[in-house]
Image (tube, rainbow, N blue to C red):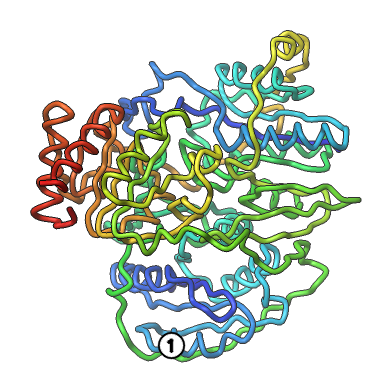
Amino acid sequence: MSILVVLEQQGGQWHRMSWETLAAGQQLGVALGQPVEAAVVGKGIGTLANEAATKKLTKVWAVEHDLLESYTADGYTAAVEELVRKTQPSVVLFPHTYQVRDFAPKLATRFSQVLVSDVIAARVDAGALTLVRQFFQGKLSGDVRVSGAGPVFASLQAGAWRADALESGSAAVEAFAPALSADKIRQKPEAPFREAARAVDLTAAEIIVSVGRGIKEQSNLPVVEDLAKAFGAELAASRPICDAGWLPMERQVGSSGQTVAPKVYIAVGISGAIQHLVGMKGAKTIVAINKDPNAPIFEVADYGIVGDLFEIAPALAAEVRKAKSA
Amino acid sequence: MKIIVAIKQVPLRDSPLHPDSSGKWIDEGDLSFEINEPDAYALEEALQLKEKHGGEVVVLCAGPERAAQTIREALAKGADRAIHIAADDMGSLDTLGVAKLLAAAVAPEKPDLILTGLQSDDLGSGQTGVVMAELLGAPHSTIIMQVEAREGSIRVKRELENGWFQHIEMPLPAVLTMQSGSNKLRYATLMGIKKAKSKEIRRVTPVDLGFAAAAVATIEKVYVPQKSKQTQIFEGDAKTAAAQLVEKLKFEVRVL
């Protein structure tokens, strides 16, 4: 029995979550007393496989095929399925990326299993594995146990494990050529693109005032615009605000928007769904203003005010101006 | 184009959530329910495709009796008919079980396209559509922003991370999971609400669908997460709290 960690790369570049997942795999390997192997999937991935082989692993599988050059759900599912059938791991770990969300559930189904997605912690009690994941957008956590004959499939949440805990070592690289055929790959992907050049670079901002659903209506936006002005901050938003067209997409912070790490991030009326948190939890200081004391945003906040943002934001803007003119 | 939209009924956003006496799920006693938000976008996309290309939109929902209300609302928005998989104990099913139920109801309908939301606001596993596609032997794509129907195929705009997108073409029938915000949602009109009363809701049970499966993934316990970070909360009225916060930002964080 072994643990298999499926790393993610695109066009020869690692996805940053790959190393976190590998670190989690190493820790789980110790807890379960099992060797840990990694897989790199794609075309022309020799360099990446060699780099992965400098980590403490028993083996790195270089899963290579011309048909894996561009990601497709059908191609990746078939390739990883073949590797899993060959190596028969007890646990298969993935980073919880958009790409993994696209194919790992399909893969797990082929083993009559369920992917346990967006996992934030793992425990081993007397050899039995318990996975912890979030429900209701982070408002509740839950312990999940997996039974059944196939391996346990799990995808791990961004930031739940630390990449700097990764142990170095030396592993053998073994090439694995899956038997893929073009007619079995039904998705025809085109080249990725960006909508337009971003006029707003939130990553350069020292202070960001960010607004979420709590603002209720577009006509209420001046409340936070004024707060941003008082701080001399950039204005940002969580996804629902940009989806509604109240602020342009380029001001969106989160997994589908920008990732920011300002000195101060002031979250106003943002509950803190994980898709938002991954985009801002690297901020040096986080301030949360929210009416719900149990909102997940307080999980990452250094300072908080619980209450009505329509009272607090204007009061805060006034106090900031007072402090600046003092 | 015949489109099936799989929707789920979930607790209203901002509902108070407390574990129930079993500790394995939440106490639903006092909660109100609504359509899962990404599913509402899937329904909207289906209705727009029908407006452009003609055809039929069938709503599919697995859930207890209360789900009938959410189904009626979908019909009032313009869906043509509905299939309600009446299942009281959805909690005993895992994603594979739910997807098997849905797939069993979808298969005899032979739709061209199956849409659903990219994830549910309650369980949030984000897999039901993908698993259903695998069970039906259909191609799929996830986190979709736009759908363009072509002859026998579709071309979709898929969201990637960090502001990137990609177009993907695939043959029909196919399964897509829709991203929130991909369209502007419509409201039900009075006429729509009136018409919905005479639209067909076919009720089937898991037994009718020949369903018998044990869950492989089970929730042992749900709980309010333990805070790992010490948050300093400022109390008092708005002015007092704001003044304390500014004090910290000025003298400890040193940004003012």
Badge 1 amino acid: Ala
Residue at image x 75%, y 37%? B106
Q: Residue shown at 65%/66% (left/top)?
A: A192
Q: Is residue B7 visible?
A: yes
The answer to whether B44 is drawn above or below residue B172 in the figure is above
Q: Work out whether B243 lies above or below B255.
A: above
Picture quadrant of residue A162? bottom left
Q: Nearer the viewer, residue B76 or B255?
A: B255
Instruction: Please give left or right for residue B37 compared with residue B158 in the image.
Output: left
Does A286 sit above or below residue A215?
A: below
Which residue is denoted by mark 1 in the rendering? A53
Q: Residue at x 63, y 52 (%)?
A: B142
Q: Residue A228's spot in the image, x, y percent?
A: 32, 45
Describe residue B256's horizontal placement relative to residue B182 as left or right. left
Q: Position of residue A259 (x, y in %)?
A: 41, 60
> Label 1: chain?
A
Q: Secondary structure at mark 1?
A: loop
Residue A232 as seen in the image, left or right of residue A43: left
Look at the image and tell me whether residue B221 can be seen: no
